[in-house]
Image (cartoon, helix red, strand yellow):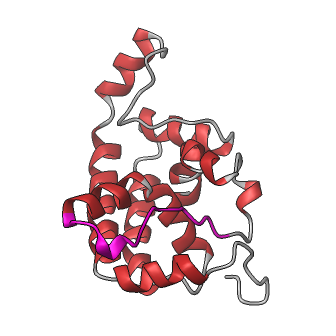
Amino acid sequence: MTHVALVGARMDAFTALGYHSRSELALRRALPRYPGKLAGLSKPDQRKLLAKDLPVWVHNAITDPDFPGRDQLVMPLRRFEGELRDSRDNEVIAAVLNAGFRNRPLDPLNLPDNMPLRQRCSMLMHVGPWQEAYRQLEAKLVETLQQRLDELDHWLATAEPEIDPAIAV
């Protein structure tokens, strides 16, 4: 569910990396490109980049057993998934999961301007559970990734896009 909600419904975060559907990401790492090392950026810039690319980091943490800090990221991801399960009847969460299964972009915290007003209002009325769960996940994942920037930079420099099926989980 987490992969569907944060990767499938946010495929626009992967298009610059050459991926257009969740199935294209199977057994593959998504390797964002940055002009320099993340560790060399200011703390606010690090947070901004890590938060912007959160769907990419979530995909890699779920898919790659060698992802830096994966063991520390598992609990926040499970907590988020539990929130999704507990609130799956919520209109926003149901819409995100539906969009994610279809690889259609839907970010409830950044609704498209072309969304019909009635749907937009309905989404805004029910966004609370999604917003709280996402904010908690984002805060914990960004904090954990910031603590491991040297490892993350090394991973970005040395990881291959393909994941060996023998080590995939």
Left or right of 45, for residue 13: right
Instruction: Report the span colored magenta.
Output: 29-43
Quarter of the image for the N terminus: give it: bottom right
| x, y percent for residue 71 | 44, 86
Q: Magenta stretch containing residue 76, yes or no?
A: no
Q: Magenta stretch containing residue 36, yes or no?
A: yes
- Kindly identify the residue that appears in the image at 63 percent across and 36 percent down: 104
| x, y percent for residue 84 | 44, 53
Residue lying at the far front in this picture: please name it: 35
- Kindly identify the residue that appears in the image at 52 percent across and 34 percent down: 95
Q: Quadrant of residue 27?
A: bottom right
Residue 115 vertical placement versus 60 (above, below) = above
Q: Quadrant of residue 10?
A: top right
Residue 146 vertical placement versus 150 (above, below) = above
- Kindly identify the residue that appears in the image at 52 percent across and 73 percent down: 61
Using the image as rendered, state which of residue 132 and residue 57 is in the foreground: 57
Dominant secondary structure of the residues highlighted in magenta in the image:
loop
Left or right of 51, for residue 32: right
Using the image as rendered, state which of residue 130 and residue 49 is in the foreground: 49
Residue lying at the far top in this picture: please name it: 117
Residue 143 vertical placement versus 127 (above, below) = below
| x, y percent for residue 66 | 57, 87
Left or right of 100, for residue 102: right
- Kindly identify the residue that appears in the image at 71 percent across and 61 percent down: 25
